[in-house]
Image (cartoon, rainbow, N blue to C red):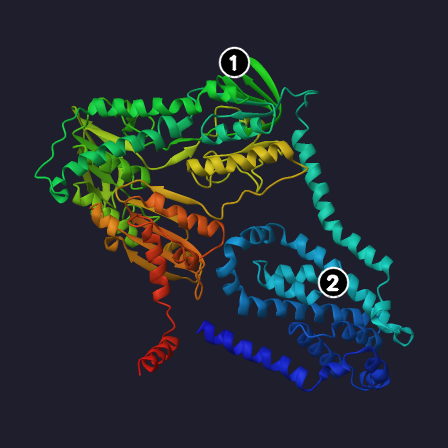
Amino acid sequence: MKSFSRLIVFVIVLGMIGAFVFFDLGQYLNLASLKEQKERLLEFYENEPAQAISIYFIVYIVSVALSLPGAAILTLAGGAIFGFVTGTIIVSFASTIGATLALLVARFLMRESVQSKFGDRLKVINDGIEKEGAYYLFTLRLIPLVPFFVVNLVMGLTPISAVKFFFVSQIGMLGGTLVYVNAGTQLSQLDSLSGIFSPNIILSFAALGILPLASKWVVESIKKKKIYRPWQKPDHFQYNVLVIGAGAAGLVTSLIAATIKAKVGLIEKDKMGGDCLNTGCVPSKALIQSAKLVALSRRATEFGFKSMNIDFEFSDLMKRVSNVIKAIEPNDSVERYTSLGVDCISGHATIKSPWEIEVGGKVYTTKNIVLAAGARPLVPPFNGLDKIDYLTSDNVWKLTAQPETLLVLGGGPIGCEMAQAFQRLGTQVIQVEMLPKILMREDDDVSDMIIHKLKSEGVDIRANHKAKEFGKDGEQKYLICENNGHDVKIEFDQVLIAIGREARVTGYGIEDIGIELTDRKTIQVNDFLQTNYPNIYVAGDVTGPYQFTHVAAHQAWFASVNALFSPFKKFRVDYRVIPWVTFTDPEIGRVGLSEKDAKAKNIAYEVTTWNIGELDRALADQEAFGSIKVLTSPGSDKILGATIVSAHAGELLTEFVAAMKNNYGLNKILGTIHAYPTWSEANKYVAGQWKKARKPEKLLSWVERYHDWRRS
C-alpha cells in the first residue's frame, strides 16, 4: 500500500514538473518579464488584494515544494507588488511552507530506500543531525551560496523533524528574504540578479552562518572551563597518557601510545591481560576445546571407529586451562610492555583530579587519562544467594572437583557455552532462563538450532523460568523459580551465575570527580570516546556498547590517538561493522543485521540461506549441521548482515566482515576462488544461491534459442 502511495505522489510531482516544462512557465519567472508585468500586477493587487495574495502565496509554495527554478524572481515580485513589510511576511511563510513540503515529499519518496541502502554509511550523519541538526540547518540557511532547494531535499533524507526544520528555516532564511524583498521594492533600478548580493553582503551572511557553530564552540569552552574550575592543573605532566586497567583496551591503548613515542603509564592492580586472558575468553575456549574432544569420542562410530574411551580427571582439565593462560601470559606481561616503552605501574589507582592519579601513595600527573577498567559478572541480590557458594565467570576456573549437577543461570552466550562444556564433561546441567528461549538476541531459527543441539546432548533447558530465591535443605542447595505463575524448585550442587556483566564504575575515583554515567551504568562518552572531562577518555567494557575483546581493542585505537592528538585531530569511533561469535558447538557467527534487527529498524532486506549440510568438507569432517544466512539490500548484492551457525563459524564470518567493511558484495565473493575442499567454500555457495535466485529468466530463454539455432 505504501509503495502504491509513493507511486501516486511521484506521478503527481512528475506531472506538475512536466507541465511547468511543457507550457514553458519558466518564461514568466525572469527579471525582464517581472519588470514588464509589474504595473499590471500592482493594479490586480489594488483591485483584488486578498485574491492576489492568495494566488501569489500558493504559486510560491508550489514552486518551492517542487524545487522549480524561479524562487528568487518570485521573492523580488513579493517586494515589488506588496511592499517591504507585507512582502517579507508573505514570502517568509510561503518559502518556509514550500521548503517543508519539499522536505516531506523527498522524505516520503526516497528516505526509506536511501537509508536502507546506505544506512551504515549515513549513521554518523544521522546521529549528527539528531544531536545538532538545528545548528547545521541554520548555518546552511544563512549562507546564500548553498542552493536552498538542495538543502530541502537533502534534509528530507535525514531524521530531522519537520517541525524543527520549519522553525529553523523560518528564522534562517529571513535574512536572505529581507535582502531580496527589499531589492524587489527597487525593481526599476535592478538590472540583474547578480547585483542583489554584493561580495560584502555574501561575506556577512557567511559570517552569520558560522555564528551558530562559533556560539556552540564558545558554549563548549565555557562548559569546559566550568568543569575544570574546581581543580588545580599541574604546571608539568609526567605522562602524555595514563591508562587505568591492563585488559584488552588498556594494553592496546598503551601499546599504540608507546609506538608513537608518547610517554605512557599503564596501571593494573591485579593481573595483566584482564578478564579476557585470566577469566574470560582464554580459559573458556580452553575448556570448550577439551569438552569437544570428549563429545567427539562419544561419536566414534560416526568416524568409523567401534568405540573410543577418554579417561580424564576434572582437576587435570582445569590444570590445562591454567597452563593455556600461562602460555599466553608473556604476550601481556609487564616485561613485554616495559620493553615496548610502557611504564607498568602495579597497584590500585585512585583518580584525584582530571590530571592526577594516586597509586600506592604516589601521585602521577598526566595530560590525559584513559579509563579501561572493564566489567565484572552481574550478580543480582537474589534472596538466599549469600548462603550459597555461587560461581561466576571469575571464579569458576578455581574448581577442582567436578559438580554432579550444575545450575547455569542465564541463557546468553556465556551461559550456553559453559552449559554445553560442563554437560559434555559429564555434569548434568540445568540451564535456567527467564525469557521464552535462550539466545534471544539471535533470530529464532538460529537459537532453535542451538537449543536442539544442547538438548540432544542432555542439557536440561528451563526457559520461561524466573529465578526468585536460593536456599538450602541441609546440604542440598536449591533455586525457586516462577514458571507460568507456579513456583518450581530446582536442586543442584553448584550454581553458575551467567546473566550478564556490569561495568566497573566505582572504586577508583570517577564518582568523586563527577564523571557522568549512562542509564545502563556505563561511562558516558561522546563520538570521540571523551567523558564530560575532555581529557579523560574511555575504552572497553566500562563504556560499551559492545562487551567484546575485539571491540575493546578497536576502541583503544581511537581513545589513544584522540587523547594524544586532540584538539588538532580527532576521529569518531566507527561501529559500523562489528562481528561477534558465540562459541557453542556449532558456533554462531554474526555481523551486521539479523532479521530481528532489520524488522525492528524497519530496514528492507532480502534473505538468502544455504545449508551447511551440502558442503563437501562438512560432510568429510562429520560436521554437516548448520546454515549461512545473508541479508542483502533489495535488488542489490550489498550485504546488510550475515549469521552463520556452523563449525568454524567464527573463521567463516571474516569474509563477510571484510566485504562489509570494504563495501563489496556477494558478486565479488562469488567471483573469488576458494580452495577445495575447505569450509570457506560455504561463503561462495551462499553467494551462488543468491545469484541463482536472481538469474535473468527472459535472457536465458533467448540464449536457449540461440543454442538451439547453433545445433540446427
What residue does disc 1 label? 360
Kindly identify the amino acid type of the residue bearing the numbered disc 1.
Gly
Q: What is the spatial separation of the Cα atoms under label 2 and label 1, in whole angstroms? A: 61 Å
What residue does disc 2 label? 173
Neighbour class for label 2 at 10 Å: few (<14), some, many (≥20)? many
- In the displayed structure, does residue 38 sit left or right of residue 157? right
- When the figure is inspected, residue 672 is found, relative to residue 406, above or below; the finding is below
Q: What count of labels does the image hold?
A: 2
Looking at this view, is 444 or 466 the one in front? Answer: 444
Quarter that holds the C terminus: bottom left
Choose the circle earlier in sequence order: 2 or 1. Answer: 2
Query: Is residue 256 something one can see in this rendering?
Result: yes
Residue lying at the far left in this picture: please name it.
306
Percent x, y of residue 396: 29, 27
Percent x, y of residue 637: 43, 61
- When the figure is inspected, residue 351 is found, relative to residue 215, above or below; the finding is above
- When the figure is inspected, residue 644 is found, relative to residue 414, above or below; the finding is below
Quarter that holds the N terminus: bottom left
Which residue is pictured at 68% across the width and 33% down the height? 226
Looking at this view, is 693 or 130 the one in front? Answer: 693
Residue lying at the far right in this picture: please name it.
189
Kindly identify the amino acid type of the residue bearing the numbered disc 2.
Met
Looking at this view, is 167 or 425 the one in front? Answer: 425
Question: In the image, which disc is placed on residue 683?
Answer: none
Q: Residue 316 appears in which quarter of the rendering? A: top left
Percent x, y of residue 284: 31, 32
